[in-house]
Image: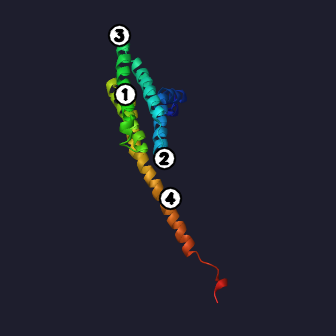
Amino acid sequence: MTSEEIDAPDPSRKASFLIRQLPYIVALALALFGVAYTNFSGQQLNFFWEFMSVAMAFVCVATGWSGAEDRQAKTRLLWMQAAHWATILVTMNLVLLPGFQQLMPVPATGLVLMMLLALGTFLAGINLLSLQICFLGLAMAVSIPAMTLLKQASLLLVLIGVAVAGLAVAFWPRGRGNSA
């Protein structure tokens, strides 16, 4: 074997790695979509966040399943994750109560639901001793202020663009045909 054959990455290993990481990538992409949609549209996606918690429960069970050695450990995993994610769902629904909604603007509700999902994901990762789940929870949590900053930055860029366009129109050299 040459050194090039040893150093060359195996395409099937890369594909296998990506397939194993797919549930985490999809969960992160969906969470980012939810934050972006909520942040930019100002509309709540209550059902979406509830769906995401149930989906994360399935991802967490799938992640911990291979580490559970016997039937008792698998049953314990199921009950622990069910209790954990049921708690997150109950908390999300408390945030959605009308009395609570009067205290918070619509875009903030979506961000609070996302924070609860991020917190639940991170804590599930700690419970499962899963670096991928912990990272997913951290990525979800970091995406909240990142989207807020992006929204503010995009507004600032639009304002700068309008100001530059206004200055260009105001100071654009006009033809000399009207001078007397």
Circle 1 SS class: helix
Residue 111 or residue 20, whichever sits in front: 111
Q: Which disc is residue 40 wearing?
A: 2
Q: Circle 1 is placed at which residue position? A: 90
Which secondary structure lies at badge 2? helix
Identify residue for label 3. 72
Q: CA distance from mark 2 to mark 4?
A: 14 Å
- For the question of whether residue 138 can be seen, the reply is no
What residue sits 47% from the left and 37% below the top? Answer: 45
Task: Identify the residue at horizontal 32%, vertical 25% (top origin).
Answer: 127
Q: Which residue is at the front of the view, 45 or 115?
A: 45
From the image, tell me which residue sits under label 4: 158
Amino acid residing under circle 1: Val
Residue 155, percent across and down?
47, 56
Q: Nearer the viewer, residue 50 or 32?
A: 50
The C terminus - image quarter: bottom right
- The CA distance from mark 3 to mark 2 is 46 Å
In this view, which residue lies farthest toward the bottom?
A: 180
Label 3 neighbour load within 10 Å: few <14, some 14-19, many 20+: few
133 versus 101 height, above or below: above
* Residue plotted at (48% across, 26% down): 20
Q: Which of pointers 2 and 1 indicates the residue nearer the eye? A: 1
Residue 109 in sight in this render = yes
For the residues marked 1 and 3, what is the alpha-carbon distance in whole angstroms? 27 Å
- Element at label 4: helix
Q: Earlier in the sequence, mark 1 or mark 4?
A: 1
Identify the amino acid type marked 4. Val
Asked if marks 4 and 3 touch (Cβ < 8 Å), the reply is no
* Residue 86 x/y as whole percent: 37, 24
